[in-house]
Image: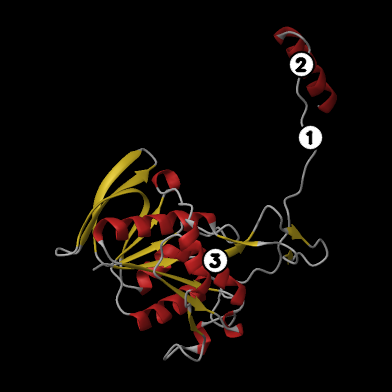
């Protein structure tokens, strides 16, 4: 039976986030949090593999207590288990510290054959987590997967189609394997009422910095995060452009030369 891990994240709705002009900090107050959209595609891929070949899907996330809601969304969409890593000691973590905590906690759950991740998160958009987790799990990595063609548990291989800049590549990797998917063929499903109701009362396993054995305090949270963001600011908006619509190409050219003459 395949053991599948899906790493997800709860993020602020970036369409509603604003930046404090004085401090340069994100204003999160009053901004709703959502399940990272690209993680929903990864979850759909994980659940689809489970339905086709058998197995169980465990979703894991690191975040505050309210991230439990994102995990319940995953349970409603077909995940079997959910794990929340929550502790003030995990605050201000960059991708290096986050991948360390996730991998350390996941080891307490056993060995996983497949690990699924979204390509990136809306709030950070670094795209670094997949490669870092693959390294920490000592797993092969398939990124940008369009289709999962075949998985052979006996030979411990996975065959997939990947999207490249100049076409589609069919490639094979060994298990354990970490996979990020394109959203083209992995559209998130809408949970039925029974699944949604069951997800409301399902048990969620919790870990903190004290319940993950042998966790190194120097590698978590702010101390374990070499990436520092001193300030966040919106892009400067320049002057609006001018559309030339003088009635004919000849008049547009005359108008353009007139403008260039004034500038030069």
Residue in the image at 48% along x and 52% along y: 190
- Residue 50 higher or lower than 242, as above or below: below
Q: Residue furthest front?
A: 194
Q: Which residue is mark 2?
A: 245
Q: CA distance from mark 3 to mark 1?
A: 40 Å
Q: CA distance from mark 1 to mark 2?
A: 16 Å
Q: Which residue is mark 1?
A: 240
Residue in the image at 51% along x and 74% along y: 201
Q: Which residue is mark 3?
A: 70
The answer to which of marks 3 and 1 sits earlier in the sequence is: 3
Residue 196 location in percent, x, y? 50, 62
Secondary-structure class at tag 1: loop
- Residue 260 higher or lower than 180, as above or below: above
Front-most of 225 and 121? Answer: 121
The answer to which of marks 1 and 2 sits earlier in the sequence is: 1
Residue 28 left/right relative to 96 = right
Secondary-structure class at tag 3: helix
Res 34 → quadrant: bottom right
- Residue 89 higher or lower than 80, as above or below: below
Residue 176 left/right relative to 102 = left
Looking at the rendering, in which quadrant would you find the C terminus? Answer: top right
The answer to which of marks 2 and 3 sits earlier in the sequence is: 3
Residue in the image at 79% along x and 15% along y: 255
Nearer to us of marks 2 and 3 is 3
Residue 95 location in percent, x, y? 51, 70
Front-most of 72 and 227? Answer: 72
Identify the image's colour scheme: rainbow, by chain, secondary structure or one colour.
secondary structure
Front-most of 220 and 188? Answer: 188
């Amino acid at each position: 039976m395949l053991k599948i891990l899906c790493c997800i994240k709860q993020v602020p709705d970036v369409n509603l986030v604003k930046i404090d002009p004085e401090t340069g900090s994100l204003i999160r107050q009053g901004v709703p949090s959502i399940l990272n959209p690209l993680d929903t595609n990864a979850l759909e891929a994980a659940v689809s593999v489970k339905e086709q070949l058998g197995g169980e899907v465990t979703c894991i996330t690191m975040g505050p207590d309210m991230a439990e809601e994102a995990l319940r969304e995953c349970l409603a969409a077909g995940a079997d288990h959910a794990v929340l890593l929550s502790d003030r000691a995990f605050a201000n973590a960059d991708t290096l510290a986050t991948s360390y905590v996730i991998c350390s906690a996941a080891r307490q759950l056993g060995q996983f054959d497949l690990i699924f991740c979204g390509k990136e998160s809306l709030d950070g958009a670094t795209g670094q987590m997949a490669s870092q987790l693959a390294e920490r799990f000592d797993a092969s990595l398939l990124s940008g997967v369009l289709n999962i063609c075949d998985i052979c548990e006996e030979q411990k291989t996975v065959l997939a189609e990947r999207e490249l800049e100049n076409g589609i590549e069919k490639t094979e990797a060994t298990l354990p394997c970490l996979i990020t998917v394109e959203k083209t063929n992995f559209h998130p499903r809408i949970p039925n009422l029974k699944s949604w109701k069951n997800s409301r009362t399902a048990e969620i396993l919790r870990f903190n910095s004290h319940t993950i054995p042998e966790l190194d305090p120097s590698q978590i949270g702010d101390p374990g995060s070499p990436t520092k963001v001193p300030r966040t600011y919106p892009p400067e908006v320049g002057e609006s452009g001018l559309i030339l619509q003088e009635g004919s190409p000849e008049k547009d050219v005359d108008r353009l030369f007139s403008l260039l003459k004034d500038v030069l």
